[in-house]
């Protein structure tokens, strides 16, 4: 990336991959210089700090995960939409996703509860997914797929937790053991609907 002419979003995208691979604490400024192709002064002038760049990278990641929300809003039975999302998450994990997992899950485990600004960004990410899932659960109840007596919000929160659990569990196993565990979680989660 040429340092005289760069877009902050492009730099944040490049930095996001560095943070995603190494984690926040283990990422040095030199790692970010190497990963973005920018000079230290360009990084500091644009983002003020490593923390500022990390925040921008988390916002960019949130934009990339909009595909999950779109998948939930697509036409079709609600349970099939949830299944499609959970299967996509499992497929990402089984494909290795560059052995990085989910940046939000990684960040929640590394910094959650210790960094107010990062917590706000994590909450925004989770709230977007929860809102989409709540709407889908309500649609499923209207169509008779999901029991009317169940709280759509509670079901949505359960699915957000399931998604994050799939992300974490996916990193802890390899091969057939990984695939079977992820599929077991998906089937039990769908049965809860």
Image (cartoon, rainbow, N blue to C red):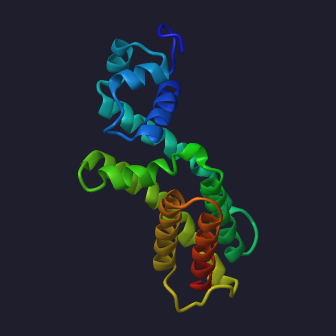
Across and down, in percent, residue 141 comes to 62, 84
One can see residue 181 in this view: yes
Percent x, y for residue 166? 53, 65
Q: Considering only vertical position in the picture, is 192 above or below 136?
A: below
Rendered view: 99 above or below 12: below
| Left or right: residue 31 compared with residue 147 | left
Image quadrant assignment for residue 82: bottom right
Residue at 44 percent of width and 60 percent of height: 127
Image location (x, y in percent) of residue 50? 32, 29
Q: In which image quadrant can residue 33 be found?
A: top left
Q: Is residue 63 left or right of residue 18?
A: right
Residue 72 in sight from this viewpoint: no
Q: What is the residue that sits farthest to the top in this orientation?
A: 4
The quadrant of the image that shows the C terminus is bottom right
Q: Residue at x 64, y 56 (%)?
A: 94
Is 80 in front, or is 100? 100
Residue 121 left/right relative to 152: left
* Residue beneath the point at 53% across and 10% down: 2
**In this orientation, which residue lies closer to the viewer: 8 or 22?**
22
Rendered-image quadrant of the N terminus: top right
Above or below, comparing residue 3 to residue 11 in the picture: above
């Amino acid at each position: 990336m040429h340092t005289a002419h760069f877009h902050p979003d492009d730099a944040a995208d490049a930095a996001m991959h560095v943070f995603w691979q190494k984690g926040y604490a283990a990422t040095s400024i030199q790692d970010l210089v190497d990963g973005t192709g920018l000079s230290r002064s360009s990084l500091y002038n644009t983002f003020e700090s490593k923390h500022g760049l990390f925040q921008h990278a988390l916002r960019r990641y949130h934009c990339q995960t909009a595909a999950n929300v779109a998948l939930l809003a697509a036409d079709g039975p609600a349970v099939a939409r949830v299944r499609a999302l959970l299967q996509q998450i499992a497929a990402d994990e089984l494909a290795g996703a560059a052995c990085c997992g989910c940046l939000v899950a990684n960040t929640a485990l590394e910094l959650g509860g210790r960094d107010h600004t990062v917590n706000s960004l994590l909450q925004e990410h989770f709230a977007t997914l929860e809102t989409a899932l709540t709407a889908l659960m309500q649609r499923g109840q209207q169509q008779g797929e999901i029991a009317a007596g169940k709280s759509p919000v509670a079901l949505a929160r359960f699915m957000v937790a399931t998604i994050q659990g799939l992300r974490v569990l996916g990193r802890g196993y390899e091969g057939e053991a990984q695939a079977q565990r992820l599929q077991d979680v998906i089937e039990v989660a769908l049965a809860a609907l």
